[in-house]
Amino acid sequence: MDNKRLLIAVTLSLLVVFAWQFFLAPKPAQQPAKQAQVADPAQKAATMSSDAAPAEEVAQNFVPTEGRDVVVDTPLYTATFNSHGGVLESFVLKHYKETIKPDSPNVDIVGKDTVAKGPMGIILTQKGSEVHTWLKGQWAFEGTDLDLKSGKQSLVFTGKSGNFRLERRLTFDAATYLISEDLTVTNLSSTGVEASVSFTAAAKAMSAASNSYNPTRIAWYNDSGRDQVTKRDDIAEGEATAGDMLKWAAIHSNYFMFAIVPGAENSVMYSGVQNDIFRMAVEEPATLQPNVAKTLKASYFVGPCERKMLETMPGNLRTVVDFGWFDILARPLLHALNFLNDYVHNYGVAIIILTILIKIVFWPLSQKSYESMERMKKLQPMITKLRDKYGDDKQKLQQETMALYKTYKVNPAGGCVPMLVQIPVFFGLYKALMGGIELRHAVFIQHLPFTDITWLADLSAKDPLYITPIVMGITMLLQQLMTPSTGDKTQRYMMLAMPVVFTVMFVNFASGLVVYWFMNNVLSIGQQWLMIAKNKKKEA
């Protein structure tokens, strides 16, 4: 085995990891939803009666009102509810635009086509009987719109469906995207009822169906850890279900989310997708005693995946943002980017500075790699003679080759081991650049120099002019031409083909990642040039 074969293996492994992650990754194991159900109805009744209130304490005179829009305005968002059931009709984020165009509308996580699916709706299922939803029965609302500058305020929607009286109290916090709900259900009948109550979420697709780098997914966290389903077909077939001490469930992309944090540990999550509308329900069992009011709790987080805010949210919501295997590297790299951006006020420049710092850290390893390749180059004439002599005896050829390496104290893996060490850093930065909301619509170079053509105006999107991936491929080719050759033409041709492969692969990558890879290539070329100049000086 020689150095070039190892280098090819490393490069091909890099490609395999990318391909596996986005096209061949196995589906997460689904957990039986029934695990979350409480087996003993008597135990449920005992648990749920602890905070029960007599039905007489509930207002007796229910007067329905006509459904109308109720607006909640905070420094972070403007939410519109329908007073008929308290269903969310729109949730517009004030600090995030749909696109980078100046006249782009702000992000509405719900979307008008989603309203019929009941975002932030309520479903009460009476076992063996009918289902009561936000659409059924009569509802009343006597409050006003909320203009919330600070602190917390609530909206109260009351309704009556069949023998059930419902009161939804939604509490808003001006400083966060969290909405807390207290749902009081009163059984007005003379008999107890075995039922279940579902808190629902619905949202338009947060990314294109073809976007494998940023899919809209269903994710959840329970006692088994975090899990998710990213393929729409699998979600449509009902494969995204979970129970087992559910902490949260969410519809989310890399940048935005609609999450539900249940108040009961024995909750179950179901989900689906149809016509680009993602739906989710978090259900908990409820034994409703006659003429007794029972309050159930849940929370919703509707907004951007801002990690700092999520750290303070209930239900371990911080785990919604997940960078996969390289999470341990992606997070500190994002912190470093944010730190640098605070000083240079440009994430593109911050990426370049971070690339330089990473290169400085790995400079000694890279230097050893180049030195090892140079020593391997000098041994090539002797290796060629061994191949001519023992070409038909592979075992003898390997023994003699290894003896040659030992005699001249050359490690055939010496040129690749330093590169292997750097691969996790590359993937960590890749995850950070693809998943950090800071990079969404972050500007590097607004327009192509000397023109008004939009260029690198969004580091989370691909280069619209394909300039950076092409230039990156050219630098990679130059790097290969500068690398010492082994004399094996087949391997040489394979190595020269790699820049083409990487250029095609990087065409659809976030431009921020391409800028990093391009800058790393430039620095590597400079280091190789210094190494070549040093060797020539020694030879002279």
Image: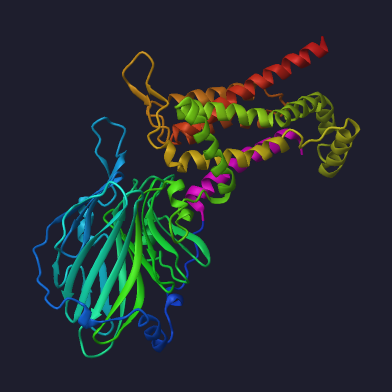
Q: Is 497 on the left-hand or right-hand side of 275?
A: right
The reply to whether residue 492 is visible in this rendering is no
User: Which residue ends up furthest to the bottom in the rendered image?
Assistant: 191
Asked whether residue 416 is drawn in magenta, I would say no
Asked whether residue 21 is drawn in magenta, I would say yes
Tell me where residue 486 sits by quadrant: top right
Position of the C terminus, as image quadrant, is top right
| Segment colored magenta | 1-25
User: Which residue ends up furthest to the top in the rendered image?
Assistant: 540
Residue situated in front as seen by the camera: 133 or 56: 56
The reply to whether residue 363 is visible in this rendering is yes
Residue situated in front as seen by the camera: 458 or 199: 199
Residue 382, percent across and down?
A: 84, 27
User: Which residue ends up furthest to the right in the rendered image?
Assistant: 407
Residue drawn where x is 20% and y is 51% of the image: 112
Residue 389, percent across and down?
A: 86, 33
Q: Is 22 on the left-hand or right-hand side of 175?
A: right
Q: Is 9 on the left-hand or right-hand side of 439?
A: right
Residue 413, percent across and down?
A: 76, 37
Residue drawn where x is 50% and y is 65% of the image: 29
Residue drawn where x is 25% and y is 87% of the image: 290
Residue 128, percent across and down?
A: 26, 85
Majority secondary structure of magenta residues: helix
